[in-house]
Amino acid sequence: MQELGSRKPDSRELQQALGAVVRGDIEFTAGQRALFTMDASNYRRVPVGVVAPRDAADVEATLEVCRERQVPVVARGAGTSIAGQATGVGVVLDFTRHMDRIVRLDPEAREAVVQPGVILDRLRGEAGRHGLTFGPDPSTHSRCTLGGMIGNNSCGSHSVAWGTTADNTKALEVLSYGGEAFTLGQGWDGAPQGLRPLVDARLALLRTGFPDLPRRISGYALDALLPENGVDHARAFCGSEGTLGVLTEATVKLVEAPGARALAVLGYADESAAAEAAPGLLAHGPLTVEGMSADLVPGPKRQLPKGAAWLFVETGGASPAEARAHGERIVRAAGALDASIVTDPAGQRALWRIREDASGTATRMPDGSEAWPGWEDCAVPPARLGPYLREFRVLLGEHGLRGTPYGHFGDGCIHVRIDFDLLSTQGIGRFRRFSEELAELVVAHGGSLSGEHGDGQARAELLPKMYGDELVRVFEQVKGVWDPADGLNPGMLVRPDPLDTNLRFAPLPREPVPVAFGYPHDGGDFSAAVRRCVGVAKCRNTTAGSETVMCPSFRATGAEEHSTRGRARLLHEMLAGEVITDGWRSEEVRDALDLCLSCKGCRSDCPVGVDMATYKSEFLHQHYAGRRRPRAHYTLGRLPRWLRIAAPFARVVNAAASVRPLAALAKRIGGIAPERDIPRLAPRTFRRWFAKRPQSGTPTVTLWPDTFTNHLSPAVGEAAVRVLEDAGLGVALPPEGVCCGLTYLSTGQLDQARTILRRTLDRVPLDRPLVVLEPSCAAALKSDLPELLGDDPRAHRLAAAVRTFAEALAELAPGWTPPRLDRPAVGQTHCHQHAVLGEQADKELRGRAGLTGELSGGCCGLAGNFGFEPGHHEVSTACAEDQLLPAVREAPADAVLLADGYSCRTQLEQLAGQRGWHLAEVLARGLDETPEPKRT
């Protein structure tokens, strides 16, 4: 048989053949193929097409069609693999869309039957109802799938207590590329014919060829087939990276979750000292022993005890007191410089986020330069970890490389991203030489090339260094028994592609492409900005939480192209020009970005700071250059201009908008969604109100009269003036004609935005703080302005002058006492505030005013022009239903409904019939002792 993947199949015929027998989704478009070219590794392979099967019958039918045409098949979960094993040149099976059910959960037997696309956190959530959990928990637990975990034999931070995925797997339903179905468990029944004679003939080699350490993930786990190890085929299959069979169902074991947990954080002088301390803690029965150094903690280290490296040691108990006592025993045995014990669940989550985000933050060195995986997770015996780390640091220095180790110190498993140059021939050569020498170092310490993420393409070529040629030939023979046609994930594990081929960066342009924004954090290079996305897929998180915003459109649709990662992949392929060939004119990229709300959540929530709102603005600017735009760009995108024109006729406009036929006609002409009501204009603008009031002395601050406050919500501005003056601050407005350019920016009209912002710089005084009430406008001035006009020093001065309402009071009137309201508050932190401005000052101000409770996270879904555009209403509503609307419905009747953003207030009014209030309005009412109307 000709080698699979060596000839290009007839994709149209293949798609038609699949369509005749598969009920699931079959996608062969350039856009869909582009979404699946990469995982979270350094590698890239372009698939022929993508199939999202609905059930095992669909998988079987897909395998049959591909087998007949000699097309390879790659099974894929969340695509967070670090070594390249979730990429492929044939048909990719995407299990996340349909085969994501928990088939059965038996709390008495402590086991669950799941399909491969089940997200780990979903299984843990269901098991948690019964006091159980699934032990392995990679840092990607909010989006990784059980199928992917079985494919990689994933581990996570709790492996010192509960082991690897293989340790927690009981039985597997598997289909081979040849069409055979197997039920894998203990014993030889159900295994492929020919496997037992092969194992029986190599018993001595299998007994001596595998290093004994807790995190040996490399190669095939053939020692699990030894008679003294129970001939466990389910265990042996774990970690085979989709090269032997395709998983369709798994029976996994559950463990009892501790009733309470405590987190002991131990500080050490450096990571080697932390590593040497870790093995001594294992005798005390911790749940985790995780290590990381100061390089991976951005900003102040206030949450952490003194030191330059830390161990995170979690302990369990039946009660909080028991868990804490367990943690105190750990601290006494740790020999740390400093230590703290955290029992508060929120405090623990905040600390764990630092550790879990390391997979992303490690992709940037402290100076901002790029770092990459490839040697992400070597493992050595825990007792050897300290010496290994010292020699590892020496090896880095010899090659002129930098990296920051972190990881599962209790299991001897180290993660590290290294600043490889994978763009130049010289840099790629260094990558190969370093990889070869590091493999030898790991083996010299009795270790495994992979301790968690598998070998894939990154390490499989070097397996002979670890196992020797004879055992690697046995791996090849096992592959031959399971998959003689080499149809499943070829190029991985067995007869692997060289580690320095198929690199994801190879097709990217070597010179920066001309762009409008400055991309100051990426050296002005749009390609480097897009490369920020390494694929850890935190944007695919489906668990609601007040700490995150990203990614509202993915949470609404569940589609990869609507995740931040998916959009970054499309932009990468647009720049590469192989799959998406029409560059900035690409309709696939345009359509994927269409449902991006420009919420900026990824700017803060993405561990590597991907800023899709800016990328979208850039793309729209380039895409529509010299072309007709959607009508909404001319109306909503230029809203400040139209509102200035309409202001003198506000009553007439409002009257016309109240007549349904006229409103419908206006919406059709203006490119506004028919489901939306047209907001009413204020009969008197905020500027007119301010001009007619008595002057309040020497100005202390400039109050920004944003378009929304001035024309649509002047009561917010009036309330802010009332509060600021009560705090002793003199208020002035800037001259007419200033604008932050927000609506122009969000629609990609960057030439006009640049002109408007330059005029603003000419007119706004820069000698006093600029208080901005609308969070989206504040974010535009704070971030977009200096990134678009970075060559003008005034842009940076103005950005530095921006203060939110709460920041201005905290900084400029620290002695002011707000009115005491003593009421619960409900609402949502504005997504731009969360992403760009920060919310600590607001939290403190609400607390001083007696407004209790936490605001929800997420995005309201209206997001400026987004929710008003045709075709967006369903997603806009789904975003609001994710967190905001449920929080409002569940709130006490006397709760204050806070919404600082005009879009948030409009969404609440139009979808919930509720009046939202800016914090300034609530405080002003408190000053005037005017009771706020009850919520309706």
Image: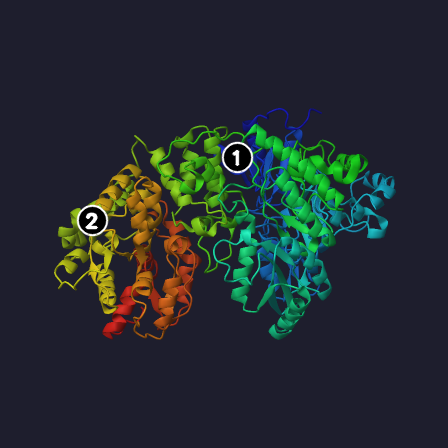
Structural crowding at the residue carrying mark 1, measured as other residues with C-alpha within 10 Å and reported as few (<14), some (14–19) or many (≥20) = many
**161 above or below 849?**
above
Indicate which disc residue 33 carries.
1
**126 above or below 92?**
below
Residue at figure coordinates x 56%, y 62% from the top left: 306
What is the x, y in percent for residue 196? 84, 42
What is the x, y in percent for residue 533? 50, 42
User: Is residue 689 shown left or right of residue 313?
Assistant: left
**In this orientation, does residue 477 appear?**
no
**258 above or below 404?**
below
What is the x, y in percent for residue 683? 16, 57
SS type, badge 2: helix
Residue topped by disc 2: 643
User: Is residue 489 shown left or right of residue 583?
Assistant: right
How many angstroms separate mark 2 from mark 1 (CA)?
43 Å
What is the x, y in percent for residue 759? 22, 43
SS type, badge 1: helix
Nearest to the observer: residue 322 or residue 423: 423
Screen quadrant of the N terminus:
top right
**How is the structure coloured here?**
rainbow
